Amino acid sequence: MTITLPIEHSTKQQPDCDSPFESPSPLDSLRERHCAVYYTLLWRRKQLLVQLTEEPKTPYLPPLEAEHWLTECLQRSPVRLVKLPATLTEVNLEVWANACAKAGKSAFLQVPNTKALPKKTSRVQWWLKRSIEWAIAALLLLVLSPFMLVLSWLIVKQSAGPILFNQWRVGERGKLFRILKFRTMVAGAEQLHHQVMGNQPGLHKCENDPRITSVGCWMRKYSLDELPQLINVLRGEMSLVGPRPWALYDAVRLSPEVRHRLNALPGITGIWQITRRSTLRDIDAVNRIDLGYLGEWSFSQDLKILLLTIPKVISGFGAY
């Protein structure tokens, strides 16, 4: 079954929408706008394939508030997963991802298939890597849990808000997952993201980001904010060593020629983190590094990267 569906999205600074209105959130100083985005929905074997369409076809459904309505529809639907076009905007992807999460459905970006993955080319080594990484992550969580409790207390003492920060990232085979970090910014900092970054090209990183707290600055310097990602490793969403886990606002800017990189399982650390880290913000350059890592992958290389990460973290190399 195929239908055309216009969904009314609440977006930030969309140039093609009319009728601006003030955001209801006091923490969000950006102006928001409503516009209808047309999708063609195609059901295939309990999978929902979402495609963008420029002009509506009949029959189509009337515009509705996106996330709440999508959640209700997905909850009633027999589909198990939703495949989203990589050409969607960050805001539209987030609407779908949130709705899928609330409905208990998996959300995936539509990315080109590739056989050039360690999981397919070196199955035995890959299985060994994943088994050892799971054991290391579990052990580190157990040993570091008292220290992580201290960090949690410092975060709460510094500023009001949740201890953990979660954000949608692109994982293995394009699957969207929530990455976990200790909160290093003021509460509601995500609503101010585009106001701080503006039209900055490359990776959205800012050396003197005004949203970062003093405790957060210290944690970022030594990568302590990334300790909760050990939970992502135990869930199977991340690896200890692997390519960079792309945020939605970075993933949507990848060129079609390199989107197949999104099939790889992302890691907490990797070649990019130990060689350039925040000093390299060119998206294509980061992708080339990650593709080179995947093309030459070996278990011994991952072990070397893991060992090299320790002195880099202690020295605060390239972190902000």
Image (cartoon, rainbow, N blue to C red):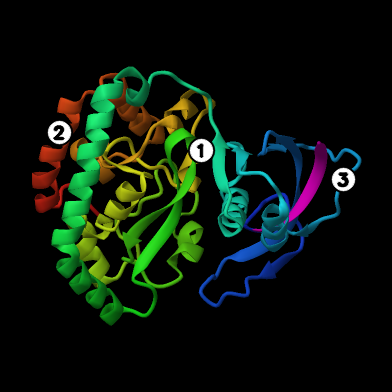
Q: Secondary structure at mark 1?
A: loop
Report the quarter where the C terminus lies. Answer: bottom left
Q: Label 3 is placed on what type of residue? A: Tyr
Q: Which mark is residue 216?
A: none
Tell me where the magenta segment starts and ends, as one range: 1-10
Q: Label 1 is placed on what type of residue? A: Arg
Q: Secondary structure at mark 3?
A: loop
Report the quarter where the N terminus lies. Answer: top right
Q: Secondary structure at mark 2?
A: helix
For the residues bearing labels 2 and 3, Cβ distance under 8 angstroms: no
Question: Where does residue 257 sit, x and y in percent of width and height?
Answer: 50, 23
| Of residues 305 and 272, the one drawn nearer to the viewer in this rendering | 305
Q: Label 2 is placed on what type of residue? A: Leu
Q: With 153 as the anchor, is 87 left or right in this view?
A: right
Q: CA distance from mark 2 to mark 3?
A: 53 Å
Neighbour class for label 1 at 10 Å: few (<14), some, many (≥20)?
A: some
Q: Which mark is residue 253?
A: 1
Q: Please name which of the two marks, 1 or 2, marks the residue nearer to the observer.
A: 2
> Looking at the image, which residue is at 36% across and 44% down?
236
Q: Please name which of the two marks, 1 or 3, marks the residue nearer to the observer.
A: 3
Tell me the quarter of the picture where residue 288 sits: top left
Q: Which mark is residue 303?
A: 2
285 to 278, vertically: above or below? above
Q: CA distance from mark 1 to mark 3?
A: 30 Å
Query: Is residue 215 rendered magenta in the image?
Result: no
Pointer 3 residue: 60
Main secondary structure found in the magenta portion = strand
Neighbour class for label 3 at 10 Å: few (<14), some, many (≥20)?
A: some
Q: Earlier in the sequence, mark 1 or mark 3?
A: 3
Q: Earlier in the sequence, mark 1 or mark 2?
A: 1
Q: With 120 as the anchor, is 85 left or right in this view?
A: right
